[in-house]
Image (cartoon, helix red, strand yellow):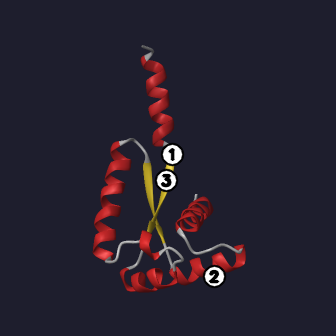
Amino acid sequence: MNRGFIRKEMKKQEDVKIGVAWHREDQWHFLRSTASDPETIEERYQDWLQSAEKAIKLLNEQGFSPVKVDFDVKEFNDWCKRKGRAPDAESRSIYVADLLRQRH
């Protein structure tokens, strides 16, 4: 086994930033009511928060660098309209990745 290769791969993985949509509790109902796929979104903000915190912990444990990306629902909906996209999970992922790229 080439240990130098493993160290290089781990370093590269640590450099990988993964955007995590960080939703606002006061916008939770708005997010669910405007999403084209509300069935994919937890009903309660607290349930989502618990899942998101677990996901961040797991990403850290796997050597990635998760970044909380503030998610404003109105701005997201406006972005969807400009891009001609449905406000769904795929669009949320692309939007967060775009915001992360702009920040870094």
Which residue is pictured at 63% across the width and 82% down the height? 78
Q: Are marks 2 and 1 in contact (CB under 8 Å)?
A: no
Which residue is pictured at 61% across the width and 59% down the height? 101
Residue 18: numbered disc: 3
Residue 16: numbered disc: 1
Please determine whether, in this image, residue 53 is positioned above or below residue 35: above
Viewer-closest of 102 and 50: 50
Q: Do the residues labelled 3 and 1 touch (CB within 8 Å)?
A: yes
Characterize the local packing of mark 1: few (<14), some (14-19) or many (20 or more) Cα atoms within 10 angstroms.
few
From the viewer's perspective, tell me whether residue 98 is left or right of residue 57: right
Which residue is pictured at 57% across the width and 63% down the height? 90
Amino acid on which disc 3 is placed: Ile
Gap between marks 3 and 1, in whole Å?
6 Å
Image coordinates for residue 47, horizontal then vertical, percent: 29, 70
Question: Which secondary structure lies at badge 2?
Answer: helix
Gap between marks 2 and 3, in whole Å?
23 Å
Residue 78: numbered disc: 2
Rendered-image quadrant of the C terminus: bottom right
Characterize the local packing of mark 3: few (<14), some (14-19) or many (20 or more) Cα atoms within 10 angstroms.
some
Gap between marks 2 and 1, in whole Å?
28 Å
Work out whether mark 2 precedes mark 3 in sequence or the reverse, and give the earlier one: 3
Which residue is pictured at 59% across the width and 62% down the height? 94
Image coordinates for residue 52, horizontal then vertical, percent: 35, 63
Rendered-image quadrant of the N terminus: top left
Characterize the local packing of mark 2: few (<14), some (14-19) or many (20 or more) Cα atoms within 10 angstroms.
few
Specify the quadrant of the image occupied by residue 100: bottom right
Viewer-closest of 25 and 14: 25
